[in-house]
Image (spheres, rainbow, N blue to C red):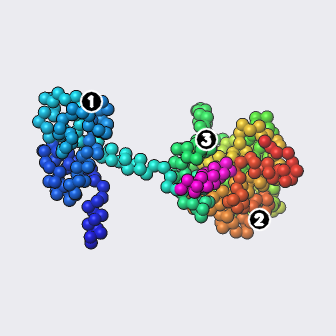
Amino acid sequence: MSGKRRQRRYRRLDRAERAAIERGLDKNRSAREMARDLGRSQSSVADEVRRNRTVSRGPAKGERVESVPEGACARLKGWPHVCNGCNKRRYHCGRPFRCEYSAARAQGLADGTLSDSRRGVDRSEGEFERIAAAIRADLARGLSPAQISAGRSREFRAAPSTIYRWIDRGYAGMSNMELRRKVGYKERRKGAPRPTSHGPERSFAAFSALPEAAREAACEMDTVIGRSSDRQCVLTLYLRCCRAQVLLLLPERSSSAVAAALDMLETAVGGAAFQRMLGLVLTDNGAEFSDWESLERSCLPGAGARCRVYYCDVRQSQQKGGCERNHVELRKLLPKGRGISFDDLEPADMAAAMSQLNSEPRPSMAFMAPARALLAAYGDDGAALMDALGMEEVPYGELLMGVEAIDRARRERGSEPLA
């Protein structure tokens, strides 16, 4: 019981108590009287007034009183230490220096002092240097603060917000320039929306009318291009349920090339596995996806349709936001502005990129890697898909979310690096 009383007595003053002190000062009450009413010690009340009084006239007006100048009123050198309660306070005092106690300003000053005391890093210098080195190394590999926080949890405890704050404040030489998402994006060109040409039965409205379970199991399809002069491009298939990203290299950006890529994938994993994982496809209105009949038609003998294709509304890429968001991660491996030509890419490069991309721990899945989620969701079918594409899960310590990962695989094969 005595411990509880001690904790209650010496807790921080709150806003209501400071307001009571201000009212008591205005009424010329003694520190002992106010302390008795508040259940505080007399020194706590006197120290609060002296510490958080502010200048109301003179240099540094509005700031905390550091010291009382020579020739100031005797009232400021002893209790009550302020001009509150003085009958000359408003109009009749001619002294050049005056100060007062305001509960609102005192609360702000106290909160600022508490905040400043908590700034910095609660680690020894050597320990923090080790932690910062690990964070910088992971940032250089293209990992986010959330992924670093989860992946390094056995080495040190730091929330993603803490890592963001350390970087923002420049601790240990870190900078926001190391965070890829801090880079601004170009403003999108706006134009009048056009109706999709594939009919209402394949529209996004028709897709939205499907059961939620079916929509969650859908695949989002898109293409990623390199330089404007490149002939090759990358077909991306994003499996919503497990956040896995499939990458297929296309010899050209055309509907026939997309259909051929899907034919290859269906042949490799089998018709039943293809329908289970890719039986429902949501894509945009690009010319390479215009021939829905060839996309849906199975290449296996005696089989009917292998999938059902739906199209987003025109200029509404957020309707397949999972795929668009995952392209941000893909661009870490195939960045723009590095002189990378997609015409130099090989199918083995796609395997290396998929292995890195699908091994990133994802905060949205409790930091499970998409490759592991793919196996958990589809079992043998997921394993067949990974084997057909040459995809494998990369340990956290070997993750490298940059073009260097693809270059490293190319050097092992004896090929020239991309960048």
* Label located before the other in sequence (3 or 2): 3
Query: In this picture, which residue range is highlighted in magenta?
Result: 124-144
Determine which of the numbered discs, if any, sits on residue 58 in the image: 1
Front one among 251 and 392: 392
- Which of the two marks, 1 or 2, is nearer to us in this view? 1
Front one among 245 and 319: 245
Label 3 with label 2: CB-CB less than 8 Å: no
Q: Which class describes the residues within 10 Å of circle 3: few (<14), some (14-19), or many (20+)? A: few
Determine which of the numbered discs, if any, sits on residue 384 in the image: 2
Three-letter code, disc 2:
Ala
- Image location of residue 234, percent across then percent down: 75, 46
Quarter of the figure with residue 199? top right
- Residue carrying label 3: 177
Question: Is 30 one of the magenta-colored residues?
Answer: no
Residue at 18%, 35% in the rendered image: 73
- Image location of residue 386, percent across then percent down: 75, 61
Q: Which class describes the residues within 10 Å of circle 2: few (<14), some (14-19), or many (20+)? A: some
Going by the picture, which residue comes out furthest to the front? 70
Question: Is 143 one of the magenta-colored residues?
Answer: yes
Label 3 with label 1: CB-CB less than 8 Å: no
Q: Is residue 234 left or right of residue 216?
A: right
Three-letter code, disc 1:
Gly
Q: Is residue 294 left or right of residue 370?
A: right
Three-letter code, disc 3:
Met
Residue at 55%, 43% in the rendered image: 170
**How would you classify the magenta stretch by its main secondary structure?**
helix
Residue at 19%, 29% in the rendered image: 95
Label 2: which secondary element: helix
Label 1: which secondary element: loop
